[in-house]
Image (cartoon, grey):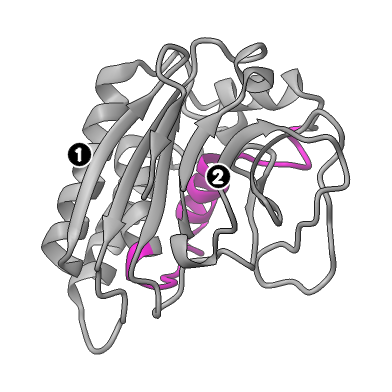
Amino acid sequence: MQFFIENTFWSLFPDALIGVVLARSVDNTAGERPDIPALLGEAAAGAAAALEAADIAAHAAVAPWRRAYQAFGAKPSKYRSSIESLLRSAQSGRLRGVNPLVDLYNTVSLRHQLPCGGEDLAAIRGDIRLTRAAGGEPFVPLGAAADEPPLPGEVIYRDDAGAICRCWNWREADRTRLTEATTDAFLCIEALPEIGAARLRAACDDLAALVREHLGGKATVEILDHARPALDLA
């Protein structure tokens, strides 16, 4: 199994950086544990205090993603990047926990103000690709039942069975979602040129350390760019 980033993506975003944290043999069961909810609560409270009445759409962590979405034809007011949605949830006090892996990557997303996401490797069919949609790839959003396929030209993550994340980081697929049964996960953190490699690396290292500390197993970090567009996930 590989993760690779196709030329159709690089032709639009040649200076983007994709951070990958591979988590193996983790314990993602929630149980009666206060540690991870406390981390998420602290990160959410810090973000909310910093934001106060800020205009999220114009925020430095959000505005570049709005421009990126426009570049592949998505309306930012309809399709919000994951970091925009997360900051809005923190600002309004509506952020809730999901499961340990998701809560940890949301913690890191808030700390570093970068989009984070994740897929259960056991649910992936074939390779993972970051590409632009032909249009019509099967996609059932997280928590839904109906197919909502991407539009032609939309930036997507996909595998051999269909799209697994639409509009780059807007919405995850239900099929490959992280659950309490997940033991091996593909976690990604994305950065546009305005962010830079150092901040992305810090976020990835933070997430890997949190996974190892709180969920056990192994977590390794890789950074992909135009010069290194592929990674072996086996």
Name the residue type under label 2. Ile
The residue positioned 38% from the left and 46% from the top of the image is: 233
Q: Given this view, does label 1 or label 2 mark the residue nearer the observer?
A: 2
Which contiguous range is marked in magenta? Answer: 76-101
Name the residue type under label 1. Asp
Residue found at the far bottom of this picture: 32
Residue found at the far left of this picture: 213
Q: Nearer the viewer, residue 102 or 34?
A: 102
Relative to 71, residue 232 above or below:
below
Q: Residue 154 — which label? A: none
Task: Calculate the distance from the C-alpha at mark 1 to the C-alpha at mark 2.
Answer: 22 Å
The residue positioned 84% from the left and 63% from the top of the image is: 147
Question: Residue 95's x, y, as percent?
Answer: 47, 63
Write down the residue under mark 1.
Answer: 205
Q: In the image, 105: left or right of 4?
A: left
Q: In the image, 131: left or right of 216?
A: right
Write down the residue under mark 2.
Answer: 128
> Can residue 165 be seen in the rendering of this structure?
yes
Q: Say what secondary structure mark 2 lies in.
A: strand
User: Circle 1: is it few (<14), some (14-19), or many (20+) Cα within 10 Å?
Assistant: some
The residue positioned 73% from the left and 41% from the top of the image is: 79
Q: Nearer the viewer, residue 156 or 59?
A: 156
Q: In the image, 55: left or right of 226?
A: right
Q: Is residue 174 in the magenta section?
A: no
Question: Residue 227's x, y, as percent?
Answer: 42, 12
Relative to 130, residue 116 above or below:
below
Q: Nearer the viewer, residue 201 or 63?
A: 201
Q: Say what secondary structure mark 1 lies in.
A: helix
User: Circle 2: is it few (<14), some (14-19), or many (20+) Cα within 10 Å?
Assistant: many
Q: Nearer the viewer, residue 40 or 151?
A: 151
The residue positioned 50% from the left and 50% from the top of the image is: 86
Q: Earlier in the sequence, mark 1 or mark 2?
A: 2
